[in-house]
Image: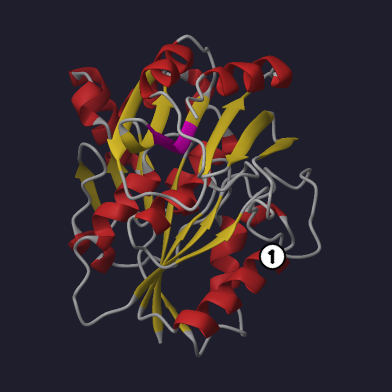
């Protein structure tokens, strides 16, 4: 049976980085695969994972928990049939509610195929003092349904943030099977061996029932032959996304990108871009831009998420100004 783990957490908490760290620790004799879902249409997280050598199947442009299970099951079935992994990690969008996904993993169709292991929820402990997160139904249920709770980005946390995290653990009912206090997504692989509790219940199981439902699996976007740029947009659940697929023939100025992105006030920025300093993974959360060198991707990808509509034409002109060739 394929051991399966759900890796949840709100927008920008570091799920993709954590998965990369887990993959770096996998036993050499095992084959691991990742099913990744993003709210945006561009599919940046999947490209980042694939650029690091991960076996990936992507379900972009929506939320696995809100699409009647069909796109999720199609993607899951395709990944199982194609890769036959020993271990499967599932990364839903940060806006995703885990209840329906967990129910699907336990249904009769997968009873003899999947063994559901511990689910892990990452959070930024600074968010625990912010009413915007603390009162968000999906944020709360991601925490509620997880077997393992991990505080990430702890180098930015205060003593009060740590106390709030410890209080959260102490009040969890049923108690969490394990917890961790980490930086840069450095999850130890032993967390996947934590016990699974059948007694965890969502407090807001219908938090996403209003979301539009898709009837089938949307293909991962890719540029057509001769196409240099494609703009992709999405909106729902109180958020808007604007993203671009960009031909690998284009090279961007890393300095110009930094200047531009650091001047934007958006909820989230992420991308994998071919620059004059080499291919870079770009990630902005809470106004802080970070970058990491990576392997050359098949295409450059950049995506913005925000709670307000964005000036798409202005943003695209600024992006193209950063292009060198």
Q: Position of residue 76 (x, y in %)?
A: 57, 72
Q: Nearer the viewer, residue 16 or 145?
A: 16
Q: Nearer the viewer, residue 145 or 68?
A: 68
Q: Position of residue 222 (x, y in %)?
A: 63, 53
The residue indicated by pointer 1 is 71
Q: Where is residue 81 in the image (x, y as percent from the top left)?
A: 54, 84
In percent of the image, x 18 and y 56: which residue is there?
A: 188
Which segment did they paint magenta?
A: 270-275
In percent of the image, x 54 and y 18: which residue is there?
A: 266
241 sits to left or right of 123: right
Q: Where is residue 254 in the image (x, y as percent from the top left)?
A: 37, 24
Q: Which residue lies furthest to the top in this view?
A: 263
Q: Which of 108 and 172 is in front in this view?
A: 108
User: Is 179 within the magenta?
Assistant: no
Residue 133, placed above or below residue 187: above
Q: Nearer the viewer, residue 177 or 227?
A: 227
Q: In which quarter of the image is the N terminus?
A: bottom left
Q: Residue furthest front?
A: 325
Q: Residue furthest bottom?
A: 112
In percent of the image, x 19 and y 74: which residue is there?
A: 27
Residue 131, placed above or below residue 32: above
Q: How crowded is mark 1: few (under 14 residues within 10 Å), some or many (20 or more)?
A: many
């Amino acid at each position: 049976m394929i051991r399966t783990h759900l890796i949840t957490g709100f927008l920008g908490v570091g799920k993709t980085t954590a998965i990369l760290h887990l993959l770096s620790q996998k036993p050499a004799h095992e084959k691991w695969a990742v099913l990744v879902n993003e709210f945006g249409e561009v599919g940046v997280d999947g490209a980042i994972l694939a650029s690091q050598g991960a076996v990936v199947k992507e379900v972009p442009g929506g939320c696995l928990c809100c699409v009647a299970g069909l796109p999720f099951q199609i993607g899951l079935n395709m990944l199982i049939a194609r890769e036959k992994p020993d271990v499967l990690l599932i990364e839903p969008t940060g806006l995703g509610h885990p209840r329906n996904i967990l129910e699907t993993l336990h249904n009769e169709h997968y009873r003899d195929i999947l063994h559901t292991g511990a689910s892990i929820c990452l959070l930024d402990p600074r968010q625990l003092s912010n009413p915007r997160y603390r009162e968000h139904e999906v944020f709360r249920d991601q925490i509620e349904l997880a077997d393992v709770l991990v505080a990430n980005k702890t180098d930015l946390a205060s003593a009060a943030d740590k106390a709030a995290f410890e209080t959260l653990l102490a009040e969890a009912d049923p108690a969490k099977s394990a917890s961790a206090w980490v930086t840069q997504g450095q999850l130890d692989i032993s967390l996947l061996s934590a016990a699974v509790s059948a007694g965890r219940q969502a407090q807001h199981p219908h938090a996403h029932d209003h979301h539009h439902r898709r009837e089938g699996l949307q293909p991962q976007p890719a540029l057509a032959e001769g196409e240099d740029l494609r703009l992709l947009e999405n909106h729902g659940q109180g958020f808007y996304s604007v993203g671009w697929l960009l031909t690998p023939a284009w090279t961007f100025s890393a300095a110009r990108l930094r200047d531009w992105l650091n001047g934007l006030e958006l909820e989230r920025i992420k991308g994998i871009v071919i620059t004059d300093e080499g291919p870079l993974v770009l990630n902005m959360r809470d106004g802080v831009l970070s970058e990491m060198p990576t392997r050359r991707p098949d295409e450059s990808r950049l995506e913005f998420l925000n709670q307000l509509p964005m000036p798409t034409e202005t943003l695209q002109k600024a992006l193209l100004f950063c292009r060198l060739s």
